[in-house]
Image (cartoon, rainbow, N blue to C red):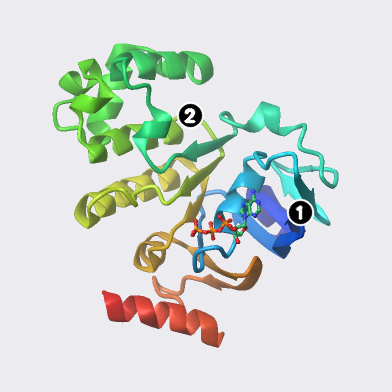
C-alpha cells in the first residue's frame, strides 16, 4: 500500500524556505501532490502562493535564497537548492497555464500555426491539423475550423483561455500549474473552463496545482486545499464528499467569508 502511494506521488516537499533580501517569503513550507490530484493553494494576497508556484517552476530569480530539507519530484530527490534539473522539466514535465492569453499566445500568428509549432516540439503525434481541430472541438470551441484559422484577437478571452488550457493539458506534463487561470473571465465562462480542466486532468492522470483567490472555485475543483498565511502552511484539508472542514479559526473565517459572498 505504502509503495503504491509513493509511486503515485508527483511532488513532495519538506521545509521549503524562500528568502529575498531580508524578506522571509516561504517559511518551512511542506507540500505534496499525487497523480490525478487537484491541490489548491488559497490565502490572502501576499501569503506566498505565486512564490511557491515560481519555486515549483524553477523560476525564482537569482537574488532569492531557496533551501529545502526534502524536494522529491518525479521520484527523484533534488539536492538542496539545486535548480539545474528544471531545464529538462519546465514546459515538458511541468507546465504552466498562464493567467491570460496575452502571455501564452503570439498575437500575429494563427491559432493553428501556433498549435502545430507547439506540438511539433513536445508531442509530435498531435502536430497535425486534424488532431488540432479535434482538440479545439473537445475544448468547447463552437467553430473549431474558424478558430484554427483565426488570430488570437479574433477570439474571445474565454476561447483563448480554453486554447491555453488545451496546450498545457495535452503537453504530456505530469504536473500542471494554474495561477488564477480564469481570473480575467466572467464567472460562467470561468466555471465551464474549470470543469473542463478538472475532467481532463483526471482523465490524463496529471497533478494540478491550482492557485486562486476564489475559494468557491477551489472548493469545487480541489481534492486538497492548503491554506497559507504569511508564507506559512496553516493547514491542509482533504475533501470529504466534496466538502472541506477547516480546523483553524483563520481558515474557518476565510471559508465563511466565501460562503457569505456567494
Ligand atoms: N522579488 C521580490 N522581492 C521582494 N519581495 C517579494 C518579491 N516577490 C514577492 N515578494 C513578496 O513576497 C510576498 C508573497 O508574494 P506572492 O506574490 O507570492 O503572494 P501571493 O499569495 O501570490 O499574492 P497574490 O494573491 O496577491 O498574487 C509578498 O509580501 C511580496 O511582496
102 in relation to 31, above or below? above
Residue 36 location in percent, x, y?
Answer: 50, 50
**Nearest to viewer (mark 1 / mark 2):** 1
Which one is nearer the viewer's eye here, 95 or 63?
63
Q: Position of residue 240 (x, y in %)?
A: 45, 74
Q: Is mark 2 within 8 Å of ligand 1?
A: no
- Give the left or right position of residue 128, taking residue 57 as reference: left
Direction bottom: furthest residue: 249
Q: Mark number for residue 54?
A: none
Residue at the limit of the structure toward the front, as seen here: 22
Cβ of mark 1 under 8 Å from ligand 1: the answer is: yes
Residue pointed to by mark 2: 171
- Mark 1: which secondary structure? loop
Q: CA distance from mark 1 to mark 2?
A: 36 Å
Q: Quadrant of ligand 1?
A: bottom right
In the displayed structure image, the side of residue 4 where residue 98 appears, left or right: left
Q: Is residue 242 above or below residue 69?
A: below
Q: Quadrant of the C terminus?
A: bottom left
**Residue beneath the point at 80% across and 54% down:** 68
Q: Residue at x 22, y 52 (%)?
A: 186
Are dots 1 and 2 in contact, CB under 8 Å?
Answer: no
The local secondary structure at tag 2 comes to: loop
Q: Quadrant of residue 113?
A: top left
Q: Can residue 246 be seen in this snapshot?
A: no
Residue 225 position within the rendered picture, expressed as x and y whole percent measured from the top left: 51, 66
Say which residue appears at 76% left-offset and 54% top-offset. Answer: 21
Tell me if residue 124 can be seen: yes
How packed mark 1 is, by other alpha carbons closer than 10 Å (few <14, some 14-19, many 20 or more), is: few
Q: Nearer the viewer, residue 165 or 183?
A: 183
Q: Which of pointers 1 and 2 lies earlier in the amino acid sequence?
A: 1
* Residue annotated with mark 1: 21
Residue at coordinates 45% horizontally, 83% vertically from top-left?
Answer: 253
Amino acid at each position: 500500500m505504502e509503495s503504491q502511494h509513493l509511486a503515485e506521488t508527483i511532488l513532495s516537499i519538506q521545509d521549503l524556505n524562500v528568502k529575498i533580501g531580508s524578506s522571509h517569503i516561504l517559511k518551512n513550507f511542506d507540500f505534496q501532490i499525487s497523480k490525478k490530484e487537484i491541490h489548491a493553494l488559497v490565502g490572502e494576497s501576499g501569503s506566498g502562493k505565486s512564490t511557491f508556484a515560481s519555486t515549483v517552476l524553477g523560476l525564482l530569480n537569482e537574488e532569492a535564497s531557496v533551501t529545502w530539507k526534502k524536494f522529491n519530484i518525479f521520484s527523484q530527490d533534488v539536492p538542496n537548492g539545486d535548480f539545474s534539473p528544471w531545464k529538462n522539466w519546465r514546459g515538458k514535465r511541468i507546465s504552466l497555464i498562464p493567467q491570460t492569453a496575452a502571455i501564452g499566445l503570439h498575437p500575429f500568428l494563427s491559432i493553428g500555426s501556433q498549435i502545430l509549432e507547439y506540438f511539433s516540439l513536445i508531442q509530435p503525434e498531435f502536430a497535425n491539423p486534424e488532431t488540432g481541430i479535434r482538440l479545439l472541438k473537445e475544448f468547447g470551441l463552437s467553430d473549431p475550423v474558424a478558430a484554427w484559422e483565426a488570430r488570437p484577437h479574433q477570439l474571445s478571452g474565454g476561447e483563448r483561455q480554453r486554447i491555453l488550457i488545451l496546450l498545457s493539458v495535452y503537453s504530456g506534463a505530469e504536473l500542471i500549474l494554474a495561477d488564477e487561470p480564469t481570473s480575467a473571465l466572467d464567472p460562467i465562462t470561468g466555471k465551464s473552463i474549470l470543469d473542463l480542466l478538472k475532467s481532463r486532468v483526471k482523465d490524463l492522470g496529471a497533478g494540478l496545482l491550482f492557485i486562486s483567490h476564489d475559494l468557491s472555485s477551489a472548493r469545487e475543483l480541489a481534492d486538497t486545499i492548503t491554506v497559507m498565511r504569511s508564507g506559512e502552511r496553516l493547514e491542509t484539508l482533504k475533501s470529504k464528499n466534496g466538502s472541506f472542514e477547516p480546523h483553524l479559526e483563520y481558515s474557518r473565517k476565510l471559508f465563511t467569508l466565501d460562503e457569505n459572498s456567494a
